[in-house]
Amino acid sequence: MITIKQIQDNLIDALRHSNLTQTELAEKVGVKQSQISCYLHGKKLPSLDTFANICAVLDIDPTDILDIDKYGKTI
């Protein structure tokens, strides 16, 4: 089972590899920078539509953030 900490770490890693700042990501996703900060610090999780938009902007498969393999099992 995945934890919020794992999601947080995966989001941080994806953002780091994108070379975007939190502010740039927030602008592209349409949320406030403080929301992105909350997601990255594990204080809250994004809504499904925001999560999908974050993945699209970061050009990452949602299953990578959620550590799910192609069979739906947590890695």
Image (cartoon, rainbow, N blue to C red):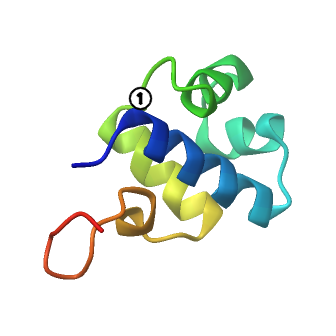
Position of 74 relative to 8 (above/below): below
Find residue 22 and report its horizontal and vertical position in percent: 78, 37
| Viewer-side residue, 26 vs 11 | 11
Q: Is residue 17 above or below residue 32?
A: below
Q: Nearer the viewer, residue 43 or 19?
A: 43
Residue, x 26% and y 76% (percent of image)? 69
Determine the secondary structure under disc 1: loop
- Which residue is depicted at the point 44% across and 71% down? 61
Question: Between 34 and 2, which is closer to the camera in this rendering?
Answer: 2
According to the image, label 1 marks what residue? 45
Q: In the image as oriented, which residue stretches furthest toward the bottom? A: 70
Q: Residue at x 81, y 34 (%)?
A: 23
Indicate the quadrant where residue 33 lies. top right
Q: Residue type at mark 1? A: Leu
Q: Residue at x 39, y 62 (%)?
A: 62
Q: Position of residue 3 (x, y in %)?
A: 34, 39
- In this rendering, the answer to whether 22 lies above or below 10 is above
Figure check: 45 above or below 66 = above
Q: Is residue 19 left or right of residue 45?
A: right
Name the image quarter holding the C terminus: bottom left
The x, y position of residue 15, in whole percent, is 71, 53
Dot 1 surroundings within 10 Å: few (below 14), some, or many (20 or more)? some
Number of residue marks: 1
Query: In x, y percent, where is residue 7?
Result: 45, 45
Relative to the observer, which residue lies in front, 50 or 72?
A: 72
